[in-house]
Amino acid sequence: MDKKTNIYNFDDIRPLNDSEVGAAIEVLIESDGFRHALNYIMPGLDWEAFTTQMRMCKTREQFKSTLAYSAVELVARRSTFSLDISGRSRMPDRPCTIISNHRDIVMDVAFLNLLLYDIGHGVTQVAIGDNLLIYPWIDLVVRMNNSFIVKRDVPRRQMLEESRKLSAYIHHTIKETKESIWIAQREGRAKDSNDTTQNSVLKMLNMGGESDILTNLMSLNIVPVAISYEIDPCDYLKAQEFQMKRDHPSFVKSKRDDLLSMEIGILENKGRVHFTIASPVNPALERLDPAMDRNELFSAVAAVIDREIYRHYRFYPRNYIAYDMLCKTSRFFSLDYYTAHDREQFLEYLQKQIDKIDITNKDEPYLRTRMLEMYSNPLKNHLEKTDAKT
């Protein structure tokens, strides 16, 4: 075992062990909050039949492959026009660290794991921030469904040690338990869809290694994944948050705000949803100079990951419409990528979303611009920062 992993006890952040599943299921069955959430997602649920099915799950794998899989599949059928994945030939046949852009609090990795399971790769362990564990039953559900906890609500002086422990756990999971993991490229979602890998994430991943930065990161077998939603049902909530922070710089979202974003993101229409497995980054990292300044090296690694994500987005008419509306350049896509009817429908959609916002001094032009940025930024980055052609 790696020297940096055996100094830690991971019990407070790891997924549940199989021996803990039975007791967790009994707690969930007695939880009014859990039952209410399931009834909200699956109206008409036969609770007695469902609890019988839950009690049949004796291991984490059984819970994931039956109940969790079925729940995500149901959400996909109800809230997407299509859900698919490409680039599967690029997926390595060994445990890897999947780093993706982050659109939806819950569904990004839920959909990804559904698709990975379908193509025979198996589900990943999932990094989830403790700020989202609003209720005890949520903590149990995510840890039974292969999630490990990223502690964010800790004193600043404790954060460095928690980052070391988290990194040690990730290295342990890849190298010792031989499971892949998923982590977002940044803390929280990129609310404006300007997806950039944070150096702080890479610095955390490096901590658990025993060698130099590049060797440590390469040992994690990083594979970028590009996530593309045709419709972001939380776009108006994100725009509202932008105005709240503009008008009240000290504004901080409440737990209720996060819960609402989770509910909307799970249940509302997302249109076409596509995941693209990009190329593993180790060949590109091998070409970097290990003698570079430390911060420059982390930035160079982040740029490699970003380019792979930008290169592999899937675009829809609204991305081109938003780009044309915001970017006053000589490049216009209307003749090839959308129609006048597409544009009319998108503008009607924007107004309906803006109409849902109920805040003091509501600034509609500002809100509309923020929402247009959400749909245009992926295309903007694709065009400006990669060699790929549209």
Image (cartoon, rainbow, N blue to C red):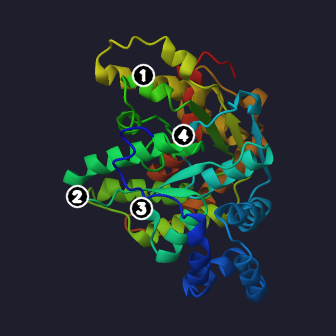
Q: Which label is found at residue 130?
A: 3
Nearer-N-terminus badge (2/3)? 3
Q: Residue furthest front?
A: 1
Amino acid type of disc 2?
A: Pro
Q: Residue 174's quadrant in the figure?
A: top right
- Tell me the residue at 62%/48% (across/down): 124
Q: Residue furthest left?
A: 157
Q: Is residue 206 visible?
A: yes
Q: CA distance from mark 4 to mark 3?
A: 22 Å
According to the image, label 4 marks what residue?
174
Say what secondary structure mark 1 lies in.
Answer: helix
* Residue 225 sits above or below residue 162 on the image: above
Amino acid type of disc 4?
A: Ile
Q: Which label is found at residue 155?
A: 2
* Residue 248 sits above or below residue 203 on the image: below
- Given residues 134 and 102, the one toward you in this image is 134
- Tell me the residue at 47%/76% (across/down): 136
Amino acid type of disc 3?
A: Asp
Say what secondary structure mark 3 lies in.
Answer: helix
Q: Is residue 362 visible?
A: no
